[in-house]
Image (spheres, rainbow, N blue to C red):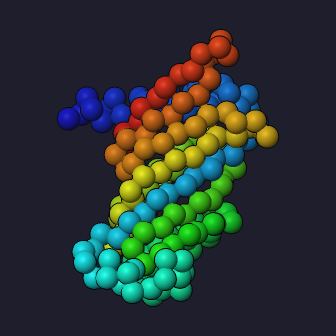
Amino acid sequence: MFSKIKLGIEEWKKLEADLERISSGAPLELIINLTLVASGGEEEEEEEEHHHNHVHEIDNDFTREVAKLIDYIAHTYNAHVHPHVHANHGSVMFAVKGAPKDLLKALREVLDFVKLNCEKCLLHSLDGEFHLGEDLSGIYFGDSYKITVIVPAEDGKRLKVHEVHF
């Protein structure tokens, strides 16, 4: 078990080192898009069917927990959050700027917040991008267990793939 934990930490360190190399000391921007689903059963599905497909003013446990997540993100990272939430699913997108170490910390903290504070919502998937100024510097996708990050290799001709675990 300890070797798996150590391996997980090493992968995060390798990713951080690659992002440091790419940024050359300049701040990066991390765009995070979280796709969330309700953890409940049929009652959320029935409620969604009852409402028109694009009604966003639904008040249930799922939407209240997503609202708490949005508040956490907005206040913790001073980020403008773009939600698109229905009664039993939705997405939350925002951007954070900073050093690679801080961006990876923010990504882990947001996922931890969802895991620890959302009983009625689950992270279905996440994806996003790393930007250096106007340039795309990397992409990532995954779920609450594993994230795959693709960045340019040192030679600039190939891509490097990192798989980091939570």
Which image quarter: residue 113? Answer: bottom left
- Using the image as rendered, state which of residue 36 and residue 45 is in the foreground: 45
Which residue is located at x 73 percent, y 28 percent?
24
Q: Position of residue 116 (x, y in %)?
A: 35, 65
Q: Position of residue 78 (x, y in %)?
A: 68, 65
Q: Can you say which quadrant of the picture contains the N terminus?
A: top left
In the image, is residue 44 above or below residue 121?
A: below
Which residue is located at x 61 percent, y 34 percent?
138
Q: Position of residue 94 (x, y in %)?
A: 62, 59
Which image quarter: residue 38? Answer: bottom left
Which image quarter: residue 124? Answer: bottom left
Horizontally, residue 40 falls left or right of residue 30, namely left
Task: Report if residue 105 is visible in the image.
Answer: no
The single residue placed furthest to the left in the displayed view is 1
Horizontally, residue 12 falls left or right of residue 156, namely left
Which residue is located at x 33 percent, y 31 percent?
6
Which residue is located at x 37 percent, y 50 percent?
144
Q: Position of residue 121 (x, y in %)?
A: 36, 69
In the image, is residue 112 above or below residue 80?
A: above
